[in-house]
Amino acid sequence: MMRRRSALFLLTSLALHGAETPDPTGAGMDPARLARIPARMKEFVEAGKAAGIVTLVARHGRLASLDAVGFQELETKTPMRTDTMVRIASLTKPITCAGIMVLVDQGRLSVLDPVEKFVPEFKGQKVAACSPAGGCTSAAASRPINVLDLMTHTSGLPGAAPAGRGAAPVSLAEEVAAGGKLSLLFEPGTAWNYSNIGYATLGRIIEVASKKPYDQFLAEELFAPLGMKDTMFFPGDDRKARIAAVYTDDNGTLKRATQVESNTGPRIPAPQGGLFSTAADLFRFNQMILNKGRLDGNRVLSAAAAEMMGTSMTGEMKAGFAPGAGHGLGYEVIREARGTYRYNSLGTLVKGGAYRTYEFIDPAKDLVGIILLQRTNGGGDVADEINTFVAMAAAAIGK
C-alpha cells in the first residue's frame, strides 16, 4: 500500500511531450539537490496547501529535472502528471507580448504606435482626477496610450472593465471596445497599474494588425514553430482528461473552485490569462526567450525583440508584485539587489499567474524554472511554494 501511495505522490522522470529525458549532470546541476525539490513539494501537498504540483528545471538548454507530486484531481485521486495541462493564467501575458513583437519584426506595428490606431474606441481618453474632499473631474490625457504602455502596465487603464455595463461581449473586439470608454487612473507612462483590460487590448491589436483571429495568430506564429503542442485556449475532448482541477483554500481545506472551471459564456480567447499549457511547453517558450529568439535552430523572434522583452522599461517607479522588480514586456525583471532574495540574479525575468503558476529565466545562471499549481488564493507571486522552488532550483546548480 505504501508503495502505491508513494507512486501517487511522487512521479519522476515520466515521458514528456516535446522534451528530452532529464539529464541533471549534463545540465550542470547536482542530482541530489534537485531531488530535494519534489520531496519538498510533496510536503506542501501533504500539508493540504496544494492538490498537486509540477516542477521543471533546465540549464544550458538541457532539461535537468521534471517532477509531479500529488493529485491532478483530489476527488478521484487522479495523480498529477508531468504532462498535466493547467490554466496558466497570467503566464499568458508574455506570450501575448511575444505575439506583438512578431508583428514588430514583420514591420506591421511599432511599440510606440497609439492604441487608437488599431482600436478607434481609445481615441480621446481622459484622465480622472478625484479630490480628497470628494468629487471627480476628468481632463484629456497629455498623449494617447501606446502599445508599449499596455505591455508594461503603464497605460493608466484600470485592472478590468467594470462588470454589468450592458450586454456581455461576444468577441474580443467588443470586450476591448468597452475598455476604450474607461477613464484613465493616471497620465500614460507615469505610473504602474496591473491591467488585464490593457492586455486584452493587445490581443485585439494583434487581430487588427495581422488580419487574423488572435488565437489563430499565436498558434501559427508561436505554438507551431516552438512545438508547443499542448498550449491552447480551448482544449478539445481529447485533452480534457489531462486538465488539472482548480482548488481554493477554505479555512485550511482545499475545495473545488467550480466557478473557475465553468465556462458557459462565449468562447473569447483571453490574452490576459486564458491559456492552458504544460510545463514542457512553457519551458520551450521561455528557453526561446533565453536563446534570444531561437529554439531548435528555428528563429521565432529577432534577438532584438527577445532582449527588449527582458528589459525593465519602468525606471524607478514601483512595478511588479515581488521586491526589487521592474517591468519589461510581459515579464517582471529583477533590477535591484533586494530582488535576489530567492537567489535570482539581477536581470532575471519572472512571471506569476493567479493560480500559482510561475516561471523564471535567469540569464546569468543560464537557468529556466517552471512551477505549476492550481490554487486560487494565498501568497500570489511570493507564495511559499514559489519562493521555495525558485531558491532550491538555483541552489541545485553544481558547476
Image (tube, rainbow, N blue to C red):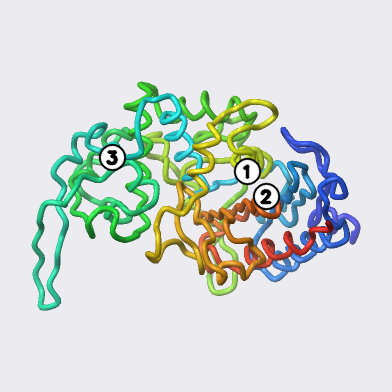
| Label ID, residue 85 | none
What crowding class fits label 3: few (fewer than 14 Cα within 10 Å), some (14-19), or many (20 or more)?
Answer: many
Task: Return the x and y of residue 167 as percentages of the image width and height.
Answer: 22, 41
1 and 2 marks in contact (CB < 8 Å): yes
Q: Which residue is mark 3?
A: 176
Identity of the residue drawn at 37% across and 50% down: 196
Task: Return the x and y of residue 253 as percentages of the image width and height.
Answer: 59, 69
Q: Is residue 5 visible?
A: no
Type of amino acid at the residue the image marks with label 3: Val
Marks 1, 2: nearer the viewer: 1
Q: Is residue 21 visible?
A: yes
Label 1 and label 3: CA atoms lie apart by: 31 Å
Identity of the residue drawn at 42% across and 45% down: 272
Vertical placement of residue 232 versus 246, above or below: above
Label 1 and label 2: CA atoms lie apart by: 8 Å
N-terminal of the pair, mark 1 or mark 2, is 1
N-terminal of the pair, mark 3 or mark 2, is 3
Question: Quadrant of residue 16 in the image?
Answer: top right
Vertical placement of residue 135 versus 242, above or below: below
Q: Which residue is mark 1?
A: 290
Q: Considering depth in this image, is 161 or 23 the residue closer to the camera?
A: 23
Left or right side of 4 for 189:
left
Q: Residue furthest bottom?
A: 133
Marks 1, 3: nearer the viewer: 1
N-terminal of the pair, mark 1 or mark 3, is 3
Task: Return the x and y of residue 303 as percentages of the image width and height.
Answer: 55, 35
Identity of the residue drawn at 42% across and 36% down: 269
Left or right side of 241 for 13:
right
Label 3 and label 2: CA atoms lie apart by: 33 Å
What crowding class fits label 1: few (fewer than 14 Cα within 10 Å), some (14-19), or many (20 or more)?
Answer: many
